[in-house]
């Protein structure tokens, strides 16, 4: 009999997942609503899960509450369920408020809360299916075990974190599924455009808790912090055997490693007992580390919870074969998630020591004790950039404020200094102030500190990996490093802003009103009729200094409304009287009064607000540069195209898509890579993300040569060499692959791509083992110098030498056009706001 037929027969006999009887017969089992047992004949869709959970809730209101906490990007409701005994459900809001006090480090008697998160990766459906069986078990079971869990704890369940990605995958898979266990079966070839792991914008949301950009992430973090759980389980799939913690090294130091390792061992042993009783295989302390704070488990551990990732073995399909030929089904994977969730909930219930350790962790955060000398961070720079950073921190629960006075501190450490010397620093009004002594102090320290510590033994082991094989051996070769993701992310570097950390936090008057109220932050000055009249009378030009991304955003808005805009390539000093004389650096935007429609000019104030400067004369008072000089250049009204894929594959465009649509709000056209062989004349710029490539010869090269502007976001190999746009030489030697760190780079201030920056040094992310050397012919806009340039993360011995004189951003003139080549994607995960101006300049300043 064919394997597929055997698989189908096995699916016709559902596994017994209801082992916690007796059950309340008035509460419907999931199959009563669905018409099939979860995990069997199909992957359940979002609406069918919704119907199932609503049916359970309607009959079990004494044991559960269900509520919406937000909406997905595509508008699907995001829901939570809370389960406990009728007595506890009756005082659920009171319990939540008790946990608010606990989260401030206060002593309070309450029940522990365990949070079970399902399906953050939409094409890992086992947890999506298990959510329905878990909900039924907690709502209907009258077994002594379940009743004890409900009496002594609150279990919060998120049935689907990523409904948009799950729906893409489920609808596609159900449309072609034959329950074929063969690993090469057609139903197992998930197209790149479907790829349900990620959300609408194709973000991996289990990497999003640094930038905190996605609607689903923001809503879930906000709600999770309202409840302050002690345990947080994030259920995933699919690996060869089931994984649950303890984790391997490295574990982020700010979670309190001793605390976390103690409790993950406790919960790991509880889960192991449940699995041993069923004869199920599993593994611990391997692969899935807890270092990068963008993970759900790391982030929640930094809030004081015991954050854990559970990876079920087996299949995201209805049936699959393991490497030894044994069969694994979606339902068996679902059943293991059900049992691990119940094992953790049982180990949590009534655990007073767990509550005590949580309170101690929060009390040490509030007092600042756990932060050591790292008491305060001060960041200076353009107001709008500081507000953006402050709002990002606020989404993570971290409080900050804009200083309303000047002050000095003698215990300051400059982030950008080559040494960590203590200096005295005077900070201006308007500085962003973050005091680490607060409820989410561990998150604040993790996101802001210049360098996080690795375990010494882990650090040493990674440095010695290369020595595990003779030099030059290719097979089997040396052991690879054990990093699972990025190792450097410190936000002052990510924003490319001046910053200091301080060893004390004396009182400073500050306000967070502009951070908490986006409406206040976006208020525009009008000035009344007199100001509007002044816009027309006796004005030579209008100037906007380029300080933040909002400035170039507004320029794009003005261009879309028909204004002709120029940009200065040299500094100007203008003003007839000494009192109103002002300097305008290269990169200042100009709207010449004589070249724009007079009736439209009052609109400029609405667009630019108080940042719009009126120039009554174009006569330069110092030097020869003025609004009418040859050193000003007209900007094209942008028409931007972004390659999204080729109709079946995805180009890795998620980050630039989100940035354009939600952050920068700049219109664009999404095109297929096949369009590159056609007529491109309507576009001023074309962006090619790092997940795809193109053929340089033909229409694309003709378009660039004719004045087009091509922007390559990472993985630029296809655009290099004799057949490409530029021949960049790769660095020599056997470089070890960097796990994602930040390095100090130099910015060529002569280039238009540098406009808007007020510093010569910036931080850039570098990963992998292929580095390119800057060209003596020029055009290398962002380069790494010689000597010390490592800023944060992890690097190997020899990495800095390999990066000597490396190029990170190359601008190549091609005929009348340009090819702008980023060796790394500056928009990746929206982690690097300080590089946004480079990308915007590359697209718009042509």
Image: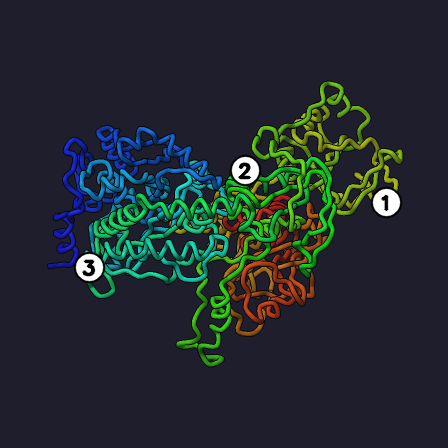
Discs 2, 3 touching: Cβ within 8 Å: no
SS label for mark 1: loop
Residue neighbourhood size for the residue with mark 3, other residues' Cα within 10 Å, grouped as few (<14), some (14–19), many (≥20): few
Residue neighbourhood size for the residue with mark 2, other residues' Cα within 10 Å, grouped as few (<14), some (14–19), many (≥20): some
Residue shown at the point (64%, 56%) measured from the top left = 811
Q: Which mark is residue 279?
A: 3
Mark earlier in primary sequence (1, 3)? 3
SS label for mark 3: loop
Say left or right for 701 vs 44: right
69 or 182: nearer the eye? 69
Q: Can residue 210 be seen in this view?
A: yes
SS label for mark 2: loop
Q: Which mark is residue 667?
A: 2
Say left or right for 254 vs 317: right
Which of the 4 image quarters holds residue 18? top left
627 or 738: nearer the eye? 738
Discs 1, 3 touching: Cβ within 8 Å: no
Up-down: is 720 above or below 154?
below
Residue shown at the point (33%, 51%) measured from the top left = 236
Up-down: is 615 above or below 741?
above
The label nearer to you, 1 versus 3, is 3
809 or 674: nearer the eye? 809
Q: Tell me residue 591's x, y (percent).
A: 73, 34
Q: Which residue lies furthest to the bottom in this view?
A: 470
Q: Residue 624 carries which label?
A: 1
Residue shown at the point (64%, 31%) measured from the top left = 562
Mark earlier in primary sequence (2, 1)? 1
| Quadrant containing the N terminus in the rendered view | bottom left
CA gap, disc 2 to disc 1? 37 Å
Up-down: is 72 above or below 734?
above
The label nearer to you, 2 versus 3, is 3
């Amino acid at each position: 009999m064919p394997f597929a037929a055997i698989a189908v027969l096995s699916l016709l006999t559902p596994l017994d997942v209801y082992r916690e009887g007796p059950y309340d017969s008035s509460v419907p089992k999931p199959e009563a609503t669905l018409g099939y047992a979860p995990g069997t004949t199909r992957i359940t869709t979002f609406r069918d899960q919704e119907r199932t959970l609503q049916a359970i809730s309607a009959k079990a209101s004494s044991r559960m509450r269900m509520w919406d906490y937000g909406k997905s990007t595509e508008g699907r409701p995001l829901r939570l369920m809370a389960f406990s005994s009728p007595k506890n459900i009756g005082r659920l809001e009171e319990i939540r408020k008790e946990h608010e006090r606990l989260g401030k480090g206060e002593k309070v008697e309450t029940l522990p809360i365990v949070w079970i998160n399902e399906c953050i990766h939409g094409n890992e459906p086992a947890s999506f299916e298990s959510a329905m069986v878990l909900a039924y078990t907690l709502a209907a079971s009258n077994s002594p075990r379940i009743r004890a869990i409900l009496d002594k704890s609150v279990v919060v369940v998120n049935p689907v974190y990523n409904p948009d990605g799950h729906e893409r995958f489920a609808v596609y898979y159900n449309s072609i599924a034959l329950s074929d266990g063969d690993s090469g079966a057609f139903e197992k070839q998930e197209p790149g455009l479907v790829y349900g792991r990620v959300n609408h914008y194709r973000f991996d949301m289990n990497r999003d808790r640094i930038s905190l950009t996605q609607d689903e992430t923001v809503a879930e973090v906000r709600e999770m912090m309202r409840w302050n759980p002690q345990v947080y389980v994030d259920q995933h799939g699919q690996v060869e055997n089931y994984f649950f913690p303890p984790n391997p090294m490295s574990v982020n130091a700010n979670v309190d490693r001793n605390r976390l390792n103690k409790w993950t061992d406790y919960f790991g042993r509880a889960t192991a007992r449940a699995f041993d009783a069923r004869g199920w295989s599993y593994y611990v302390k391997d692969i899935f580390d807890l270092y990068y704070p963008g993970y759900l488990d790391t982030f929640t551990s930094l809030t004081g919870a015991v954050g854990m990732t559970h990876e079920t073995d087996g299949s995201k399909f209805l049936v699959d074969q393991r490497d030894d030929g044994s069969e694994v089904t979606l339902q068996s994977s679902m059943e293991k998630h059900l049992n691990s969730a119940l094992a953790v909930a049982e180990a949590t219930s009534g655990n007073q020591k767990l509550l005590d350790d949580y309170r101690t962790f929060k009390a040490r955060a509030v007092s600042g004790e756990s932060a050591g000398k790292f008491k305060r961070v001060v960041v200076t720079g353009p107001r709008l950039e500081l507000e953006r950073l402050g709002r990002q921190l606020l989404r993570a629960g971290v409080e900050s404020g804009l200083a309303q006075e000047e002050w000095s501190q003698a215990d300051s450490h400059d982030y950008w200094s080559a040494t960590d010397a203590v200096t005295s620093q005077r900070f201006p009004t308007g500085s962003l102030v973050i005091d680490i002594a607060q409820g989410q102090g561990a998150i604040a320290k993790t996101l802001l500190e210049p360098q996080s510590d690795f375990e010494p033994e882990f650090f040493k082991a990674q440095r010695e990996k290369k020595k595990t094989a003779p030099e030059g051996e290719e097979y089997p070769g040396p052991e690879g490093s054990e990093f699972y993701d990025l190792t450097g992310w410190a936000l002052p570097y990510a924003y490319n802003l001046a910053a200091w950390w301080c060893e004390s936090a004396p009182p400073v008057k500050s306000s967070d009103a502009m951070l908490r109220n986006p409406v206040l932050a976006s208020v525009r000055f009008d000035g009344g009729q007199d100001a509007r009249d002044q816009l027309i009378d006796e004005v030579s030009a209008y100037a906007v200094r380029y300080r933040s991304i909002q400035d170039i955003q507004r320029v794009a808005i003005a261009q879309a409304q028909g204004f002709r805009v120029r940009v200065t390539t040299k500094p100007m000093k203008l003003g007839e009287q000494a009192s109103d004389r002002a300097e305008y650096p290269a990169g200042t935007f100009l709207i010449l009064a004589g070249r724009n429609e007079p009736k439209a000019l009052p609109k400029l104030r609405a667009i630019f607000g108080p940042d719009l400067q009126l120039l009554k004369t174009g006569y330069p008072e110092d030097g020869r540069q003025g609004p009418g000089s040859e050193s000003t250049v007209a900007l094209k009204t942008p028409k931007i195209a972004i390659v999204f894929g080729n109709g079946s594959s995805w180009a890795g465009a998620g980050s630039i898509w989100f940035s354009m649509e939600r952050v920068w709000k700049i219109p664009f056209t999404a095109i297929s890579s096949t369009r590159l062989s056609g007529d491109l004349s309507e576009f001023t710029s074309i962006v090619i993300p790092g997940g795809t490539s193109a053929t340089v010869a033909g229409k694309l090269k003709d378009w660039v040569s004719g004045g087009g502007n091509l922007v390559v976001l990472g993985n630029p190999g296809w655009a290099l060499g004799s057949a490409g746009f530029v021949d960049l030489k790769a660095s020599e030697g056997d470089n070890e692959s960097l796990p994602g760190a930040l390095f100090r780079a130099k910015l060529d201030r002569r280039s238009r791509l540098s406009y808007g920056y007020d510093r010569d040094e910036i931080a850039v992310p570098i990963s992998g083992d292929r580095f390119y050397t800057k060209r003596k012919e020029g055009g290398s806009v962002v380069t790494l110098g010689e000597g010390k340039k490592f800023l944060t993360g992890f690097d190997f011995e020899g990495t800095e030498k390999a990066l000597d004189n490396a190029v990170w951003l190359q601008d190549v003139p091609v005929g009348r056009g340009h090819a702008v080549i980023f060796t790394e994607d500056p928009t990746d995960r929206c982690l690097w706001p300080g590089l946004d101006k480079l990308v915007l300049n590359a697209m718009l300043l042509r």
